[in-house]
Amino acid sequence: MPQADQATIDLLIDYFDAMEAKDFDRLGSYYADNISLTFANAPTITGRDAMLAQMTTLLGKVKSLAHPLINVWQEDGNVIIFEVTSIWHFHDDTVIKINACSIFTVADGQFIDQRIYVDNAPVDRYLS
């Protein structure tokens, strides 16, 4: 699998920086109008507004959520496959790290599809 180019890596870094900063305007600029998100075994959500609502709710439950990249690969058709460590900082100062693998599809600098594969069981009690 070919490693991603620097522009793709920079796109992901900036996206996750916006998430960690809870900069919802910047975060929303990465989502195409018709984006779809499949997060683990949850039902797929579709649309920028639904995605931003999901992210606003999720990020309201944490101090911050970082995603340092481990590996990033790029395939034809603007498909990006990557590993991250999700670092959850909760309001009670608990920090939990969970590795995940994701497949994002990009068109014109925006995400049109996100598929995130992770076992978030260690953070479930903080998110409910």
Image (cartoon, helix red, strand yellow):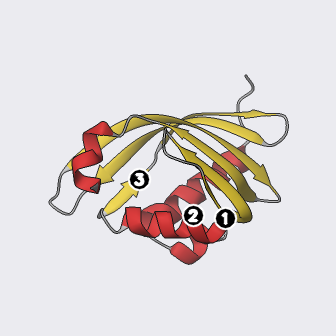
| Disc 3/disc 1 C-alpha distance (Å) | 23 Å
Depicted 48 relative to depicted 12: above or below: below
Q: Is residue 42 left or right of residue 8?
A: left
Counting other residues with Cα less than 10 Å from the Cα at mark 2, is it few (<14), some (14-19), or many (20 or more)? some
The disc, 2 or 3, on the residue closer to the chain's N-terminal end is 2
Three-letter code, disc 3: Ala
Indicate the quadrant containing the C terminus: top left, top right, bottom left or bottom right: bottom left
Three-letter code, disc 2: Met
Label 2 close to label 3 by CB (< 8 Å): no
The disc, 3 or 1, on the residue closer to the chain's N-terminal end is 1
Label 1 close to label 2 by CB (< 8 Å): yes
Q: Position of residue 97 (x, y in %)?
A: 31, 40
Q: Which mark is residue 51?
A: 2
Secondary structure under badge 3? strand
Q: Which mark is residue 47?
A: 1
Q: Is residue 36 left or right of residue 5?
A: left
Counting other residues with Cα less than 10 Å from the Cα at mark 3, is it few (<14), some (14-19), or many (20 or more)? some
Q: Position of residue 69 (x, y in %)?
A: 51, 41
Secondary structure under badge 2? helix
| Disc 1/disc 2 C-alpha distance (Å) | 6 Å
**Snapshot quadrant of residue 78:** top right
Q: Which mark is residue 66?
A: 3
Q: Position of residue 23 (x, y in %)?
A: 50, 73
| Disc 2/disc 3 C-alpha distance (Å) | 18 Å
Q: Residue at x 39, y 34 (%)?
A: 119
Q: Residue at x 73, y 54 (%)?
A: 112
**Snapshot quadrant of residue 110:** bottom right
Depicted 3 relative to depicted 43: above or below: above
